[in-house]
Image (tube, helix red, strand yellow):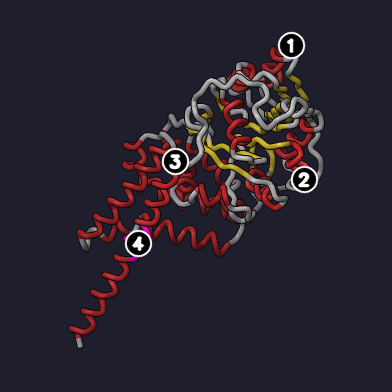
């Protein structure tokens, strides 16, 4: 009897181990496919004002740039926009009731003919701040193409032209770009890679880009370009006025309206430093992580997968050395995804376990903020 029980335990262990191998192989295949096939903004010399596919009346690009307490980013993003090789561009900046030096710094750019600065102080009922700021800027947009940017984005001079050409070449009506993330502090290295790793390491971008189903969507609100007609058809920001995850909801609405959406990587042309510390990142991810998932059951499955797939093997190896194979596959996955996003391989592999525990902390904190309606961003309640 004891022999039979022991043999059953061995068979169960072998089955579980085989399951782990299968899952890790699948994840590495997805990462390799993304490394080979993911659309990217490439360094080039795009100087044309009207790429093939746009008529003269549609060639104007309206950049909508909401700012709230962005004094540290004003000059960086404005200088980058004014230096773009694509010259048929208007820059609409919405100063969203900033309390710092944002408005004073913006004043020095008002002398440029293609720059308009809008001062907004009243937040309309039922709207979240960023969504309302974008909508306010859109009321003055004249371009046939829209570009929504965050103030912490930085761009090479050909970034806008390359993004527009990539969108048109793929016959897409909208493009969302994942910038290369800049990380300097220890807190950033513990948090930011989790976002990029979870996107590029688990989701085949080719499938996302070919699928017309709204549920198969991916987005980054730091850089979204779209045709204005498609934006209007999708309902625009009025339809997502109260959405915390406005970027993914906007992209889903594009697909619902029949538009083709392209997800791409920014490489060196579009970069971003989202947060400067662990505290900032915790607040930022905390306000949106649970709301982006939206379903408590999926959220619990997500936490269970993080623990079982990426933490438990480091415990199992103390009981059976064969689990080193699984750990090696996990590290390979981190190496591949780091290469794709041009992140530091050494730090992402060394900090893997701490990052997993940080992932759990961020998820539980996000759940707490969502259920208690205590999420805040730049002084405003996000409910």
* Mark 4 and mark 2 residues within 8 Å of each other at the beta carbon: no
Tell me the residue that label 1 is attached to: 111
Q: Which mark is residue 127?
A: none
* Residue 61 in the image, given as x and y percentages of width and height: 70, 27
Question: How far is mark 1 from mark 3, CA to CA?
Answer: 39 Å
- Magenta stretch, main secondary structure, is helix
- Earlier residue among tags 4 and 2: 4
Give 331 or 274, whichever is nearer the viewer.
331
Q: Residues within 10 Å of mark 3 (few under 14, many from 20)?
A: many
Return the residue nearer the eye: 105 or 271: 271
Mark nearer the N terminus (4 vs 3): 4
Determine the CA span between mark 1 and mark 4.
60 Å
Q: Nearer the viewer, mark 4 or mark 3?
A: 4
- Between the residue at mark 4 and the residue at mark 3, the CA separation in whole angstroms equals 24 Å
Was residue 22 drawn as part of the magenta stretch in this picture? Answer: yes
| Residue at x 54%, y 61% (from the top left corner) | 298
Q: Single out the mark in the foreground, 3 or 2.
A: 2
Q: Dot 4 surroundings within 10 Å: few (below 14), some, or many (20 or more)?
A: few
Q: Nearer the viewer, residue 206 or 300?
A: 206
Could you tell whether 322 is left or right of 332 in the image?
left
For marks 4 and 2, give the CA distance. Answer: 42 Å
- At mark 2, the secondary structure is helix
User: What kind of element bears circle 3?
Assistant: helix
Residue 128, placed above or below residue 181: below
The residue indicated by pointer 2 is 233
- Residue labelled with disc 3: 193
Name the one closer to the observer, 64 or 316. Answer: 64
In the picture provided, is 72 more to the left or to the right than 190? Answer: right
Q: Residues within 10 Å of mark 1 (few under 14, many from 20)?
A: few
How packed mark 2 is, by other alpha carbons closer than 10 Å (few <14, some 14-19, many 20 or more), is some
**Boundaries of the magenta span:** 19-24
């Amino acid at each position: 009897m004891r022999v039979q029980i022991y043999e059953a335990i061995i068979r169960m262990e072998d089955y579980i181990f085989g399951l782990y191998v299968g899952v890790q192989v699948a994840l590495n295949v997805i990462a390799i496919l993304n490394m080979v096939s993911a659309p990217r903004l490439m360094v080039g010399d795009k100087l044309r004002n009207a790429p093939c596919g746009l008529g003269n009346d549609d060639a104007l690009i309206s950049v909508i740039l909401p700012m709230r307490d962005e004094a540290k980013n004003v000059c960086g993003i404005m200088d980058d926009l004014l230096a773009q090789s694509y010259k048929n561009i208007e820059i609409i900046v919405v100063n969203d009731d900033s309390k710092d030096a944002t408005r004073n710094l913006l004043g020095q750019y008002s002398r440029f003919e293609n720059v308009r600065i809008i001062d907004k102080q009243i937040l309309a009922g039922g709207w979240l701040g960023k969504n309302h700021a974008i909508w306010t800027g859109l009321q003055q947009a004249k371009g046939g193409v829209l570009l929504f940017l965050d103030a912490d984005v930085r761009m090479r001079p050909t970034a806008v032209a390359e993004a527009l050409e990539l969108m048109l070449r793929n016959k897409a009506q909208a493009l969302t770009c994942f910038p290369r993330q800049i990380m300097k502090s220890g807190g950033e290295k513990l948090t930011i890679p989790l976002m990029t790793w979870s996107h590029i390491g688990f989701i085949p971008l080719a499938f996302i880009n070919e699928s017309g189903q709204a549920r198969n969507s991916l987005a980054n609100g730091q850089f979204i370009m779209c045709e204005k007609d498609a934006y209007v058809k999708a309902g625009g920001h009025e339809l997502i006025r109260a959405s915390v995850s406005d970027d993914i909801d906007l992209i889903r609405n594009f697909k619902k309206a029949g538009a083709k959406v392209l997800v791409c990587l920014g490489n060196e042309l579009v970069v971003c430093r989202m947060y400067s510390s662990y505290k900032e990142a915790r607040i930022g991810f905390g306000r949106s992580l649970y709301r982006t998932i939206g379903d408590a059951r999926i959220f619990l499955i997500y936490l269970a997968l993080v623990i079982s797939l990426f933490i438990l093997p480091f415990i199992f190896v103390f009981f059976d050395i064969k689990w080193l194979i699984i750990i090696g596959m996990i590290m390979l996955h981190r190496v591949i995804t780091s290469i794709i996003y041009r992140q530091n391989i050494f730090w992402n592999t060394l900090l893997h376990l701490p990052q997993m525990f940080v992932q759990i902390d961020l998820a539980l904190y996000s759940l707490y903020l969502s259920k208690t309606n205590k999420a805040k961003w730049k002084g405003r309640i996000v409910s």
